[in-house]
Amino acid sequence: MRELFRKFAQTTSQAVGSSWAFILSFLIIVVWAITGPMFHFSDTWQLVINTGTTIVTFLMVFLIQNTQNRDAKAIHLKLDELLKGVKGARTGLVNLEQLSDAELEGLQKEFARLHEKVVHEHKAGDEEQIVLEQAAKSG
């Protein structure tokens, strides 16, 4: 059952994400709007589009969520594989998605400090380079 839903969700998300699906949806709205005067813009006429769009939106939420979950999982696995394969990489970063919010925030602060250190070292290196270039020109 799970595999059947995966295939259905993947196929459906590809189909509804196409330009043809958008054009079809647009045409349905145009036809609905054109029929408004014919039905005297009645409550039933309005209810048809409201009900239709609500049902489609409700179902699409689950299909989109399923597809996004699969994509996210695949990306995480690919990144985990890269972390394992890069010498010097911290393999403790594998499965970060399993950490608590507090742990992720702590790790984010650690990377922010590391970034500031790299930026500071880079600026110091740039200043040193300028001094060396000026000395070379004057000497």
Image: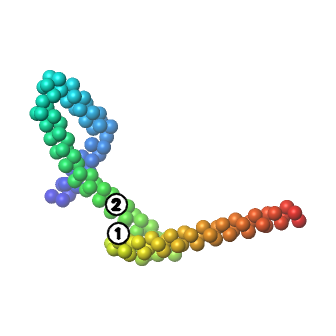
Numbered tag placed on residue 97 in the rendering? 1
The structure residue drawn at horizontal position 18% and vertical position 54%, both measured from the top left corner, is 4
Crowd rating for badge 2 (residues with CA inside 10 Å; few <14, some 14–19, many 20+): few
| The N terminus lies in quadrant | bottom left
Q: Percent position (x, y) of residue 132? A: 79, 67
Give how far across and how far down residue 134 sits, in percent. 81, 63
* CB atoms of marks 2 and 1 within 8 Å: yes
Residue, disc 2 = 72
Spot occupied by residue 50 in the image (x, y as percentages of width and height): 17, 39
Q: Is residue 37 left or right of residue 104?
A: left
Q: Give SS at disc 2.
A: helix
Residue 137 drawn above or below residue 50: below
Q: CA distance from mark 2 to mark 1?
A: 10 Å
Q: Where, by quadrant of the figure, is residue 137 drawn?
A: bottom right
The kind of residue tagged 1 is Glu
Instruction: Return the residue nearer the eye: 133 or 19.
Output: 133
In the visual, does 100 lie left or right of 54?
right
Left or right placement of residue 13 versus residue 131 in this view: left
Q: Residue at x 79, y 63 (%)?
A: 133
